[in-house]
Image: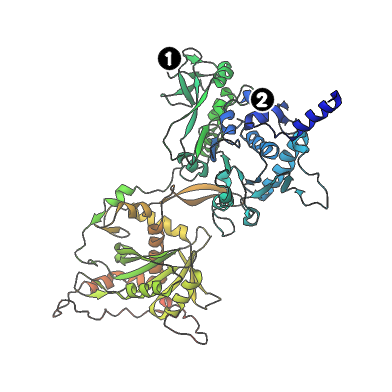
Amino acid sequence: MDLADATLTRGLSLGWQPDPILTVSEWADQHRVLVAETTREHGSWRTDRTPYLREIMDCLSAHSPVRHVAFMKGAQIGGTEMGLNFLGYVIHNAPNPTMAVYPRIEDAEDVSKDRVSTMIAATPELEARVRENRSRDSGNTILKKVFRGGFIKFSGANSAASLRSKPICNLFRDEIDAFPDDVDGEGDPLALSEERTNTYSRKKKILDVSTPTIKDVSKIEKQYRASDQRRYFVPCPHCGHMDYLTWRDAGHHRIEFDEQHPELAHMVCSGCAAKVEERYKPTMLAAGEWRATAQSDGRIRGYHLSALYSPLGWLSWQEIVRRFVTAKNDPSKLKVWVNTCLGETWEEKSDGVNASEVLNRRETYPADIPNGVGALTMSVDVQGDRLEWKVKGWGAGEESWLIQTAAIPGDPDRPEVWKELDVVRHTPWRHESGQEFRPDICVIDSGGHHTDQVYKYARAHVNEGVYAIRGGNTQGKPLVGHSSVERTYRGRLWTLCVDTGKETVYARLRISRPGPGYMHMPDWITQEYVDQLTAERSYRKYVRGRGSVRVWAKLGDRRNEALDLEVYALAALYMRGQPFVRALADRAARWAQPVLGLGEGAQPAQQPEPAPTHADRRPAAPRPKGWTTRWRK
């Protein structure tokens, strides 16, 4: 074989060899080029500049066993570029169907045009693999980049249509705390997008990156808490003691400063208490290591990093101190500083309620319905596999008593579930006086599951005081507004301002003594019930065009059916009208009158209700042809 043949044979052999197995950080060091249009430090990527990103990136390598990475971070530490490295690595070294999700579809378009396209154009290895943009070729558009072996689809968390896709192997979600809780009525965009990875369960990679927002509301904080909670430990240059950087925690490496001279800010070693100037930071970062600080089930690898780790030349300790001094007396500015500089959640001063204080209200009733009650209401919350219900007693000044709460298990699409609700509604409750009473009104939430079934049931039983309700999006309105006629089944539908209801319920849970507004709790309530009743809290949030508004959010993963039912129960009382509410004291007095000459188990007729005034009357729903007062399949 002559020299030419040998050279050709060697070239063909090398051409058929697969690309070397690289980690994401190795790929970035070898191939990634930063351009002046997107970063001030242009040129070849160097992971050594941000060594804390190496482990996070390498978890996303094809051969790593880690499947899900959550990165809760501060500002100016390289998180955005790390995400682009992941996408570049996928295109070049691990081609597979991939989705990148941003808070809005407009954000996805901007990132695709300004960041990803620029990265591809500046990196020959990527440009050679991505199809050229041709007007007649849909393979390469703003929201989809097709390459050999896969594609990257760019999606917005505010668009359910953009989250629909064929199965995907890799999922990158940026700034997830800005994602909505529900998109187009189809559910949580995090859950919707993650469902796309089920086909690739053994090789999928999910990267979630975000600056945190509100404590117990933040999505990235929730993921970080579910992880092993890794922190980047760095050595003291004087004694070598390893610890992680924090703001003012005396138990760890912390920052000390003089507000009048922020340029003198320095770290204090948690080991030897020596002062450490920021000029040592490059050495400290290079010798740092990630350490888990919590136990987890291994599903999520979590990392937390504040802006205190920002490399020299980026965001300095002195600048962080200056920003703190400027923001410390302004809660709105301080919140931004905590989120972006410390990479921590902001704890709002909220209208929460202490669950233990509610549990201490437990008392033993002398009967199902104690004296003081003059009316019963029933509220029903429809879930996917059950009906949750609650019966409340009401007295003078809207003092209330929880009578019973339980669930009817079963698919609400099945008629036997609603027949069981009939049984519950018609079951009498024994009053302390010996009389037996049933709820005056029953309201059923139609805003969630099985809406059609709710409308049908309420329409069939409207003469028995059964009504459909739903929550509205308005704020600052009365709990119960005007009713309307639902179009399909022609039943009466009441729209509630649930935020007003929650504020009222929480205000009453703070009333410490029996009397007007006080909420009595029976001795059988559990910690789970109280946790549900106090599962939300309110805080102030700036909304464009509306200014500062009060919004409600759940605390972590708590269920909140008990709170919802409490709001519905109060709405049911108000739906009876104000004359009825004002007459509760008189009704309670009549209910408390003992009944003579009745044996055990006797069921006397209920006391007649006061004749409703004109203001108390509600317009009857029109009866369409074929109307019936009984539930049909």
Look at the numbered disc 2 and give the secondary structure of its residue.
Answer: loop
> Against 101, is 44 above or below?
above
Q: Residue at x 64, y 22 (%)?
A: 313
The CA distance from mark 1 to mark 2 is 32 Å
Q: Which residue is mark 2?
A: 46
Q: Quadrant of residue 566?
A: bottom left
Residue 159 percent coordinates (x, y):
63, 54
Look at the numbered disc 1 and give the secondary structure of its residue.
Answer: loop
Residue 348 percent coordinates (x, y):
46, 42
Relative placement, left or right, of 412 versus 403 is: right
- Neighbor class of circle 2 (other Cα within 10 Å; few <14, some 14-19, many 20+) is some
Q: Residue at x 37, y 72 (%)?
A: 421
Q: Which residue is mark 1?
A: 272
Q: Quadrant of residue 270?
A: top left
> Against 287, is 176 above or below?
below
> Which kind of residue does numbered mark 1 sit on?
Cys
Q: Residue at x 46, y 78 (%)?
A: 459
